[in-house]
Image (tube, rainbow, N blue to C red):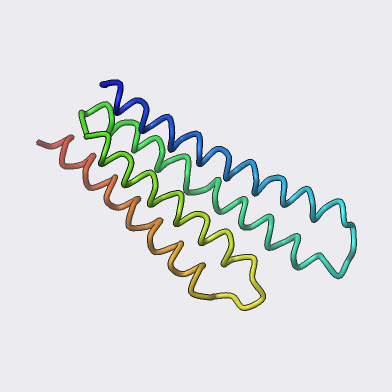
């Protein structure tokens, strides 16, 4: 793996780690409120964090393997940035009063598209 690929991968892993950390802080913030009226918001914050931890690690592992296969730094950056934006949209959307909403749906769909792109790339590399 070249330096540019390593840097691109490191950047997007780091950014997604920060997002996961911020979502965890949001859960703690809601827990400290301790108000039963905020129970719904606590549950939404927990789901935003949980959903992020369910999708992001496996996609980042796939992205890392793509980097090891020689994918360009630009490809890694496009997929990594798309994943991050999608997860931010989803985390915002899932915590809104109206669910589903456009933010949550776009975030989910783009996450799935990135996941499928990474999976397809790995499968093509593996059988090619």
122 left or right of 34 in image = left
Residue 108 is situated, as x and y percent measured from the top left of the image, at 45, 62
75 left or right of 107 in image = left
For the C terminus, the quadrant is: top left
Q: Residue at x 59, y 44 (%)?
A: 20
Residue 61 is situated, as x and y percent measured from the top left of the image, at 39, 35
Residue 68 is situated, as x and y percent measured from the top left of the image, at 27, 26
Examine the image and state in which quarter residue 18 appears.
top right
Most extreme residue toward the left is: 128
The one of 98 and 14 positioned closer to us in this rendering: 14
Q: Residue at x 88, y 66 (%)?
A: 36
Residue 22 position (above or below residue 11): below
The one of 115 and 26 positioned closer to us in this rendering: 26
Q: Residue at x 67, y 75 (%)?
A: 97
58 left or right of 53 in image = left
For the N terminus, the quadrant is: top left
Q: Residue at x 57, y 45 (%)?
A: 19
The one of 64 and 73 positioned closer to us in this rendering: 73
23 left or right of 35 in image = left
Residue 3 is situated, as x and y percent measured from the top left of the image, at 30, 21
Count of numbered circles on the image: 0
């Amino acid at each position: 793996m070249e330096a540019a690929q390593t840097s691109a991968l490191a950047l997007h892993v780091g950014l997604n780690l920060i997002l996961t950390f911020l979502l965890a802080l949001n859960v703690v913030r809601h827990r400290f409120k301790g108000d039963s009226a905020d129970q719904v918001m606590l549950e939404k914050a927990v789901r935003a964090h949980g959903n992020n931890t369910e999708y992001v690690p496996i996609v980042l592992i796939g992205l890392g393997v793509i980097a090891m296969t020689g994918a360009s730094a630009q490809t890694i950056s496009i997929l990594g940035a798309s994943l991050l934006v999608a997860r931010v949209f989803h985390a915002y959307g899932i915590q809104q009063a109206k669910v589903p909403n456009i933010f949550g749906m776009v975030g989910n769909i783009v996450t799935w598209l990135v996941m499928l792109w990474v999976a397809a790339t790995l499968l093509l590399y593996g059988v090619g």
